[in-house]
Amino acid sequence: MLRSCAPRLRTLGALRGLTGGARPAVGDAGPALLIPQGFSANGVTGSIRLEIPSIRDWTESWSKEIRLLFDQFMKKCEDGSWKRVPSYRYISPQDSKPTKEEGQMSRARIFSRSYDDGLGFEFVMFHNDVEKRTVCFFQGGPHLQGPSGLLHGGALATMIDVTGGVTAVMTGEFVMTANLNINFKRPIPLGSVIVINSQIDKVEGRKFFVSCDVQSVDEKTLYSNATGLFISLDPEKK
Ligand SMILES: CCCCCCCCCCCCCC(=O)SCCNC(=O)CCNC(=O)[C@H](O)C(C)(C)COP(=O)(O)OP(=O)(O)OC[C@H]1O[C@@H](n2cnc3c(N)ncnc32)[C@H](O)[C@@H]1OP(=O)(O)O
């Protein structure tokens, strides 16, 4: 299944070398990179196609607040201390092993990128290598409603999972989520912009212990905090 990690690590290394750069026009798709492992029910297979770097530049659906944060962090990318995490949208079907569900699999999309613009998970992430942390600016769209007018807890859990996972992945290892522990402290108004800060607290062998907090942009409200365990795959195991 995962005999050699070298190509994967090379690709991740290339990924981690990405910088923010100038902002291209909205909707201007950048080149694509394939991470040579994806996940299927049978294990690890295929590739994840990463569309970089501009595919999810801000769109009309982004509020002024998230655009402002985006611009601030793109500026921080200029000296190389922060990197914008590339957007990744779908598992490339031609690179997945043929399965019985080939027809359905050809419609596979990364969950957090599967909604039409503005309706679901609108977010951008930036990573700081030295501090081993990732910041995610997230605006939950109307299709992520839980209780009336509020963000669904599962949608927040998804974003915590993705942000924590990216924080671990950016070290150069491909990880799976083993454990997530989330405290939901305050409800989040649907459509508001929130900030998810994630950092690696400890690494023990293949285990990455990550913590996250979720706050309002003005940092006055702590909506949630969480810890997660992400484990890189053992190349010896089938
Ligand atoms: C870079 C830009 C973009 C990148 C794109 C990518 C996006 C990334 C974002 C992705 C976001 C979305 C992500 C998703 O949606 S990932 C999808 C959801 N997650 C899964 O489906 C994972 C299913 N589980 C597994 O596959 C295996 O259990 C894994 C691989 C996790 C470990 O199986 P493995 O056979 O390898 O492990 P091991 O048995 O040798 O144990 C090894 C060590 O770990 C310890 N342990 C194990 N389990 C747990 C546990 N639950 N709590 C506490 N500890 C646990 C264990 O005690 C041992 O410790 P030690 O004895 O060594 O001390």
Image (cartoon, rainbow, N blue to C red):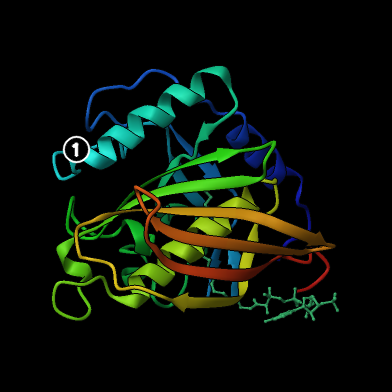
Q: Is mark 1 within 8 Å of ligand 1?
A: no
Q: Nearer the viewer, residue 128 or 166?
A: 128
Of the 4 image quadrants, the one containing the N terminus is bottom right
Q: Nearer the viewer, residue 189 or 55?
A: 189
How far across and down, in percent of the image, does residue 238 sit?
75, 74
Q: Which residue is at a point 83% across and 63% down the rendered structure image?
A: 204
Eyeballing the image, is 81 above or below 5?
Answer: above
How far across and down, in percent of the image, does residue 139 sit?
27, 54
Eyeballing the image, is 128 above or below 30?
Answer: below
Where ligand 1 lies, by quadrant? bottom right
Eyeballing the image, is 159 above or below 127?
Answer: below
Eyeballing the image, is 31 above or below 123?
Answer: above
**Residue 96 showing in the rendered view:** no
**Residue 206 showing in the rendered view:** yes
For mark 1, give the secondary structure: helix
How far across and down, in percent of the image, does residue 49 sit?
46, 47
Q: Which residue is at a point 77% across and 59% down the rendered structure image?
A: 202
| Outermost residue to the bottom | 147
The residue identified by callout 1 is: 64
